[in-house]
Amino acid sequence: MNRYHMTRHPMDAPRRGGRTRERGIVLITSLLLLLVVTLIALSLFRSFGIQERIAGNTREKQRALQAALSAQEYAEWWLSSGGNSTAAPITCIALLNANVGEGQICANKLPLIVPDVTQVPWRVNGANIGVTYLSPGMLLSSSTSVSAANVANPTYFSAPTFYISDMGASADPNIPGEIYQIDAVGYGGTGNTAAVVESTYAVYVSSRNMTL
């Protein structure tokens, strides 16, 4: 019977060790690539979240600005619409509601009775002052903001408010009239988002009422 004797080549052992080292390097490389991909994914996810918040904040600021402008425009219309501007200015110490026909022209100028007109709501002796005006279709809610449930018709934190300060008679004696300063504040979905606008409005004896 013929017998065959098999012997291992001396180089076999180092080759096997080389393959093991190669597998280890591949595994480490794969883990590093997985780590890099994971970090990139997390970074993109965080970036998308930040961009979404920025877009949301921008939208809320725009809503607050539009709300403030709606109150300002109503105040200008109220001043120029028959007889309202002829009323004697009063000391304003309360909050009225334009939606039920209320209004007031204030002898106490807003910049002189509040520390900062941008600090809202405006208050004197702990009481809110001004005139609120809720334009048609504007919904209020102090507990909800823009969400998937109301994004088509979002709510506002509070009704826009305006304050009319009587600044005195027109400086031009040839054009008799009265000058007013209108400050108005509007809110977005929360009390943390507010916008304040200001205009100077002249009501002349003639029909030349205008925003200065």
Image (cartoon, helix red, strand yellow):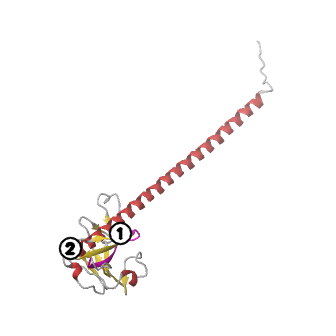
- Residue 81: give its label: 2
Q: Give the residue type that dot 2 points to.
A: Ser
| Above or below, 154 relative to 85 | above
- The mark nearer the N terminus, 1 or 2, is 2
Identify the residue at the far top of this view: 1
Q: Point out the stretch of residues depicted in magenta.
A: 175-194
Query: In which quadrant is the C terminus drawn?
Result: bottom left
Query: What residue is pinned by disc 1?
Result: 187
| Above or below, 94 relative to 193 | below
Does the magenta stretch mainly form a helix, a strand or a loop?
Answer: strand
Q: Position of residue 35 (x, y in %)?
A: 59, 47
Q: Is residue 19 left or right of residue 52?
A: right
Between 136 and 183, the residue placed more toward the observer is 183
- Answer with the quarter of the image where residue 85 lies: bottom left
Disc 1 versus disc 2: nearer the observer: 2
What SS does tag 2 mark? loop
What SS does tag 1 mark? strand
Identify the residue at the far left of this view: 82
Q: Position of residue 98 (x, y in %)?
A: 24, 75
Tell me the CA gap for discs 1 and 2.
26 Å
Between 3 and 190, the residue placed more toward the observer is 190
The reply to whether dot 1 and dot 2 touch (C-beta < 8 Å) is: no
Q: Is residue 194 left or right of residue 178?
A: right
Q: Is residue 148 shown to the viewer in this render?
A: yes
How packed mark 2 is, by other alpha carbons closer than 10 Å (few <14, some 14-19, many 20 or more), is few
Residue at horizontal 49 percent and vertical 52 percent from the top = 45
Q: Is residue 46 left or right of residue 33?
A: left
Residue at horizontal 66 percent and vertical 42 percent from the top = 28
| Above or below, 60 relative to 180 | above
Q: Is residue 97 magenta?
A: no
Between 152 and 76, the residue placed more toward the observer is 76
Q: Give the residue type that dot 1 points to.
A: Tyr
